[in-house]
Amino acid sequence: GEMEILKIQQPEFQYEGRNMNPSPEAIERAIAEGTNRGDSRIAYYSACRMLENLLEGHSMEKILSFLDRLGEGRTLDQASREAFGVDYDALIDGIRIDR
């Protein structure tokens, strides 16, 4: 599927000097702008890998709890601390693709 294609493209993007482990902000920006094929492909790949890592490292109960807390108006840090026991930056750092 798509993940396999993105994995195959990694050497091409690395050769071009692209950041293969973008920050969440860079991922969001690349997806929202959608103006650069390579950046967009890397962003989608990175976001997918981060989601896989989140699902592998945490129970669905914790993930749903996090989402519920966000829906109740808590900040990312508050929801992350309550659901996962760490602040949001630590959560993201733990699921980044090259960690």
Image (spheres, rainbow, N blue to C red):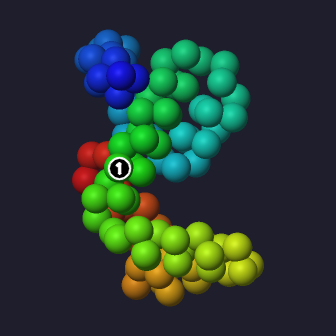
Kindly identify the residue that appears in the image at 66 percent across and 24 percent down.
34
In the displayed orientation, state which residue is furthest to the front. 61
- Residue drawn at point x = 35 percent, y = 59 percent: 55
- Is 28 or 56 nearer to us in this picture? 56
**Residue 46 horizontal/vertical position (percent):** 41, 39
In the rendered image, which quarter is residue 28 located in? Answer: top right
**Which residue is at 40% across, 23% downward?**
2
Report the quarter where the N terminus lies: top left
Q: Is residue 28 above or below residue 67?
A: above
Q: Where is residue 83 in the image (x, y as percent from the top left)?
A: 47, 81
Residue at horizontal 62%, vertical 79%? 69
Q: Is residue 75 visible?
A: no
Where residue 66 sits, quadrant-wise, is bottom right
Relative to residue 20, is residue 9 depicted above or below?
A: above
| Three-letter code, disc 1 | Glu
Q: Percent position (x, y) of residue 25? A: 58, 48
Residue indicated by mark 1: 52
Q: Is residue 45 visible?
A: yes
- Tell me the element at label 1: helix
- Give left or right: position of 18 versus 8: right
